[in-house]
């Protein structure tokens, strides 16, 4: 049996992940503060509205988890999976791998995405969700 794992080491602003080396630009404390600040806004805006969090797999999974566990009201969580990258290169188009299976008509939708860089994926998601007659659509992203 082969054990698959990631060897992650962090030493003074450097992170090694497998055979790759990275420089830390955002501390975990800064991330926690940013997530807390965003959730505070979501808790105020969506108090007692029971929004649908639509989480984009795989990237947003951990970020979505942090948002949802801090959200103080009822909500529904759904997942979609799209592909717009091959490795680290943008394909310029979006392929739908797993679609939305939640009825979102007249509901408040919060799309949860980890990183919005070119905007291609988020634009595609927003267009497709708009066709399903939601009450509102907002995007929560960790990095923009």
Image: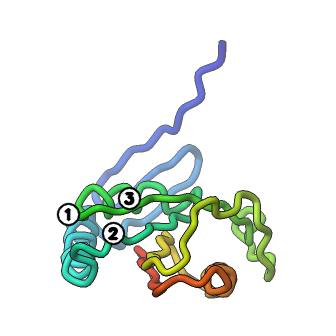
User: Which label sits in the foreground, 3 or 2?
Assistant: 2
Q: Secondary structure at mark 1?
A: loop
Q: State the image quarter where residue 83 is shown.
A: bottom right
Mark-to-mark CA distance, 2 and 1 = 10 Å
Mark 1 packing: few (<14 Cα in 10 Å), some, or many (20+)? some
Residue receiving disc 3: 14
Q: Nearer the viewer, residue 111 or 89?
A: 111
Towards the viewer: 102 or 120 = 102
Classify mark 3: helix, strand or loop: strand
Tell me what residue is drawn at x 40 percent, y 74 percent. Answer: 142
- Residue at the (27%, 70%) spot, across then down: 35
Gap in angstroms between the C-alphas marked 3 and 1: 35 Å
Point 79% across, 69% down: residue: 95
Neighbour class for label 3 at 10 Å: few (<14), some, many (≥20)? few
Residue ID at (66%, 12%): 1
Sequence-first tag of 3 and 1? 3
- Choose the circle earlier in sequence order: 2 or 1: 2
Q: Which residue is mark 1?
A: 72
Q: In the image, which disc is placed on residue 50?
A: 2
Gap in angstroms between the C-alphas marked 3 and 2: 40 Å
Which of labels 2 and 1 is toward the front?
2
How many callouts does the rendering have? 3
Q: Looking at this rendering, what residue extends furthest in the front direction?
A: 106
> In this orientation, does residue 109 appear?
yes
Judged from the image, the secondary structure of the residue bearing numbered disc 2 is loop
Q: Which mark is residue 119?
A: none
Image location of residue 143, percent across then percent down: 43, 78
Is residue 34 something that shows in the picture?
no
Determine whether, in the image, residue 45 is placed left or right of residue 76.
Answer: left
Which x, y percent locates residue 96? 76, 66
């Amino acid at each position: 049996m082969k054990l698959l794992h990631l060897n992650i080491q962090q030493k003074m602003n450097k992170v090694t992940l497998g055979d790759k080396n990275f420089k830390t630009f955002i501390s975990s404390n800064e991330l926690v503060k940013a997530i807390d600040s965003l959730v505070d806004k979501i808790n105020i805006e969506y108090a007692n509205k029971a929004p649908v969090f639509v989480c984009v797999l795989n990237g947003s999974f951990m970020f979505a988890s942090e948002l949802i566990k801090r959200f103080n009201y009822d909500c529904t969580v759904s997942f979609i999976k799209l592909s717009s990258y091959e490795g680290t290169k943008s394909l310029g188009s979006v392929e739908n791998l797993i679609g939305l299976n939640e009825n979102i008509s007249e509901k408040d939708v919060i799309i949860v995405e980890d990183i919005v860089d070119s905007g291609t994926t988020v634009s595609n998601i927003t267009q497709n969700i708009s066709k399903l007659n939601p009450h509102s659509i907002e995007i929560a992203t960790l990095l923009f």
